[in-house]
Image: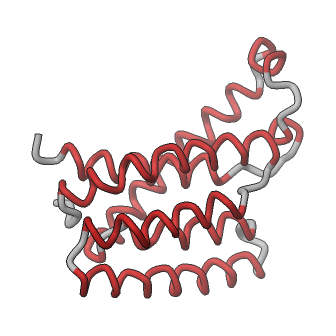
């Protein structure tokens, strides 16, 4: 059972969806997550969160940002993820209800597997490569984690929004 309320999910979904799609596209094309996307998501939370959440919950969720940022930078220093991935994951964290951390991890794992398989499949299709030949992610061994991070955020918020439907 998700802890996010349908109301807050509906508030955050229109904010997060275009940013998450931008992150996914940018990471596939350039293997970079723009700082503007990270800042936009966090700034959007700063505004929408005031409407979507009770004030104590809203304030507490900034600690999620800090914790994930520290863990993300540690993972980056260990060579496990990119710095952009760490920053975007931290910006995503306040949008996730505290009780949904485990659900989000399972969802991220599932989306990561699907995104990885789909990325590698499309990379092998000549017609796709011909239309997106300048995408850096086709040439590199590294996987564009922004694709999985953005997808997981959209799925999480959509699940929350449609849970009561």
Q: Where is residue 91 in the image (x, y as percent from the top left)?
A: 53, 69
Q: Residue at x 72, y 70 (%)?
A: 80
Q: Is 149 left, or right, of 141 in this rendering?
A: left
- Between 128 and 23, which is closer to the camera in this rendering? 23
Q: On screen, 71 above or below 105?
A: below
- Where's residue 12, x and y in %? 35, 56
Q: Is residue 129 left or right of residue 97?
A: right
Give the residue furthest to the top: 127
Residue drawn at 18 percent across, 61 percent down: 5
Vertical position of residue 56 compared to residue 116: above or below? below
Give the quadrant of the C terminus.
Answer: top left
Quadrant in which residue 74 is drawn: bottom right
- The quadrant holding residue 35 is bottom right
Horizontally, residue 7 falls left or right of residue 40, namely left
Colour setting: secondary structure
- When the figure is inspected, residue 39 is found, relative to residue 56, above or below; the finding is above
- Say which quadrant the N terminus sits in: bottom left
Q: Which residue is drawn at 61% across and 86% down?
A: 70
Q: What count of labels does the image hold?
A: 0
Tell me the residue at 77%/24% (across/down): 124
Residue 148 vs residue 14, the one in the foreground: 14
Q: Where is residue 144 in the image (x, y as percent from the top left)?
A: 71, 49
Q: Is residue 101 left or right of residue 135?
A: left
Foreground: 145 or 9?
9
């Amino acid at each position: 059972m998700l802890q996010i309320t349908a109301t807050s999910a509906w508030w955050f979904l229109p904010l997060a969806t275009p940013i998450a799609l931008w992150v996914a596209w940018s990471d596939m094309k350039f293997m970079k997550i723009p700082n503007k996307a990270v800042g936009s998501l966090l700034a959007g939370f700063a505004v929408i969160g005031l409407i979507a959440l009770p004030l104590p919950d809203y304030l507490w969720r900034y600690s999620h940002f800090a914790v994930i940022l520290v863990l993300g930078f540690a993972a980056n220093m260990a060579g496990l993820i990119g710095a952009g991935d760490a920053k975007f994951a931290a910006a995503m964290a306040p949008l996730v209800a505290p009780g949904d951390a485990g659900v989000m991890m399972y969802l991220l794992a599932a989306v990561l597997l699907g995104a990885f398989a789909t990325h590698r499949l499309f990379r092998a299709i000549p017609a796709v490569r011909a239309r997106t030949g300048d995408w850096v992610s086709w040439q590199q061994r590294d996987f564009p984690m922004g694709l999985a991070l953005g997808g997981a955020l959209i799925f999480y918020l959509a699940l929350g929004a449609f849970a009561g439907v």
